[in-house]
Amino acid sequence: MAHALSLPLSPSRRRLLQGLPLALFPFAVAWGADGGEGGEPGYALYDRPKYPPGFRHFDYVDPAAPVGGTLLLTPPTVGGSFDTLNPFTLKGSPAPGLNTLVFETLMTPSWDEPNSVYGLLAEDVAVAADGLSVQFRIDSRARFSNGDPVTPRDVASSFDTLISSAAAPQFASIYADVARAVVVDSRHVRFEFRRRNHELPILLAGLPVFSPKWAGSRPFDRVIDAPIASGPYRIAGRSQQRDISYARRPDYWGWQLPTRRGQFNFARIGYKLYLDGTARLEAFKAGEFDLLQEFIARNWARQYRGRGFDSGELRKLELPNHNPAGFQGFVFNLRRPQFQDVRVRHALALALDFQWLDRMLFYGAYRRIEGYFANSPFEARGRPGPDELALLGPLRAQLAPCVFGDLPRMPTTRPPGSLRGNLLQARALLEQAGWHWRDGALRNPRGEALVIEYLDSQSSMSRIVSVYAQALQRLGIRLDYRLVDFALYQQRMDSFDFDMTTIAYGGSTSPGNELFDRFGSRAAGVQGSNNVWGLRDPAVDALIGRIVAATTMRDLESACRALDRVLVCGWYSVPQWYSNTFRVAIAARKFAWPKALPLYYQPEAWAQTCWWSADGPRAPAARSLPPEGVHAAWGRPGGGVDGPRAAVAWSPPSGGAHARLGRTDGGVGGTDASTA
């Protein structure tokens, strides 16, 4: 299940729509046909929300945090520049920061519990007794940046705009089961469903809302200027489409909301964009911005050093990452004929030596991804249990036999395994598929050589691809590395004009409707969709339907594991790796942050939302930096992703001073491949 501002779009905005930990159904209140009353201010998908009605603030913020100062950031991926302030269309590259700082949704998640949402633009929500509609009551205090009140009509207009052909296709995909938005009265808007879908209330809770005056009479996909929205910041300045700054709005309507108190404490937040990773790192060392998240293990081990780090002006932190890892890997475009045979895809997976890469290039920093729901309770393992078999059995005729046996593990070269043994197995599979060595290459019966183009927009991936290419060459397969600029990469990915590339998407604590856009047959034919594989499989569609229909966590886990099993056995990708820490470098004497760290977060969003400037008045609840080189010692009882739902405290070293601290558009995989 995805928040509407987090599920990825095109490569330039792959985080627009990552599965944030949101959801709300069956803890819902029925409302009558007259529809006006009965809503609740907070909801959870399967359990009761952590925070009761009337709560004052989230546990991981400091309500006494001072306001002021400046935070300077850079997007996690290198885009070079932006050319639009509209993040909801496929046209152009949007400026960073818009979704978090300028736009707001009807409700908002808590970061210290999975699958819960609380009031923002909407005071409360009520789901009809028959499950075929949901109603939101808009907060009468809500205002756009131009002073206009936010009304149900504005909400309906935003919905209609986002599902239109002028917006990115992901919105129409995730809201496909919403029949219409109805303005009930001056405070209430109702969304009516085509069929029961228990995730739709939360998907609609994540609907971004903006004023229809923003577009006026213009087509929405031609709107590129400053938004008229309701968020806590406004755009304060731009420079050469490479720098943008946001100013905190003193007139923001929601400063006293419990879901906003103690948050967004900086008077100014700015972003600086750089043409390549080297320039970005050197700019950080020179003090041009304050936080840099590193995704490449080699860089973290070898390049984060120098005068600033020696003096203590800059610090390296490894923060705990409890987020579900999702997926990251080499993906095949099934629209290409060379990838139609599952034996070919399996052979290509056998040629990747992860153990060598991790030992020689990654400094032992990563864990292998085995499927599509890594580091989560939705990941399939071993043989299917009775609950999975109940879902897979009716689809047996459409599924590979391995789905019903021991789940294949990713190839390993750990002794007694070896790359040579894996390549011998790969050669046998290729021969079975009709590919034989002839005239200096691996060729099919028509004499066509097996040549694959790897498409990339950042050169740091070349070192990994070169190792992979050497192994494939031993099989007679030629892997060509094609580096293009980011704009061309985005265009080619949107039109599915590629053979192979790396894709990453963040995991979710409640997968759901976003899977239709990622793996569903209908999305395979929609340009700009996230089904970059071109996967069209009725069995996959059926299992996604069961995921969306799940009403208990157990049912959801069973359906996700069944889907994971089918995808793994299809060998549609070569899964890569993930890290269970965030590697973050910071300007060490500029910022403070609360004692409690949320469980589910991204470093950039955490800094924007929860930090404050250390130059102003001293707030009571601040934390100190950990000792140099020590893994940030936030613990989590029980480990895993499904432990206790509480904010985790980091106990600073004794005698510590006031706490001082100085994006992946392919998802939030956050490792070497996702930015390379």
Image (cartoon, rainbow, N blue to C red):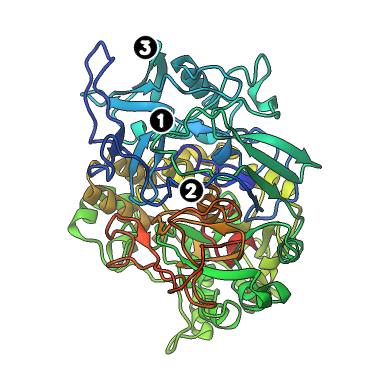
Q: Say whether disc 1 or disc 3 marks the residue closer to the N-terminus.
A: 3
At 43% from the left edge and 56% from the top edge, which residue is drawn?
A: 621
Secondary structure beneath dot 2 equals loop
Considering every residue shown, the one lying at the far front of the view is: 617
Quick one: label 2, few (<14), some, or many (20+) residues within 10 Å?
A: many
At 66% from the left edge and 20% from the top edge, which residue is drawn?
A: 219
Left or right: residue 400 compared with residue 222:
left
Q: Which quarter of the rendered picture does the C terminus lie within?
A: bottom right
At 49% from the left edge and 20% from the top edge, which residue is drawn?
A: 150
Classify 94 as above or below 61: above
Classify 500 as above or below 117: below
Q: Which residue is mark 3?
A: 184
Secondary structure beneath dot 3 equals loop
Residue type, numbered disc 2: Ala
- Write down the quadrant of residue 388 in the picture: bottom left
Quick one: label 1, few (<14), some, or many (20+) residues within 10 Å?
A: many
Residue type, numbered disc 3: Val
On residue 204, the disc is 1
Nearest to the observer: residue 82 or residue 238: 238
On residue 479, the disc is none
Q: Which residue is mark 2?
A: 65
At 47% from the left edge and 34% from the top edge, which residue is drawn?
A: 255
Is residue 543 at all visible to an observer of this figure?
A: yes
Is residue 193 at all visible to an observer of this figure?
A: no
Left or right: residue 397 compared with residue 10:
left
- Write down the quadrant of residue 638 in the picture: bottom left
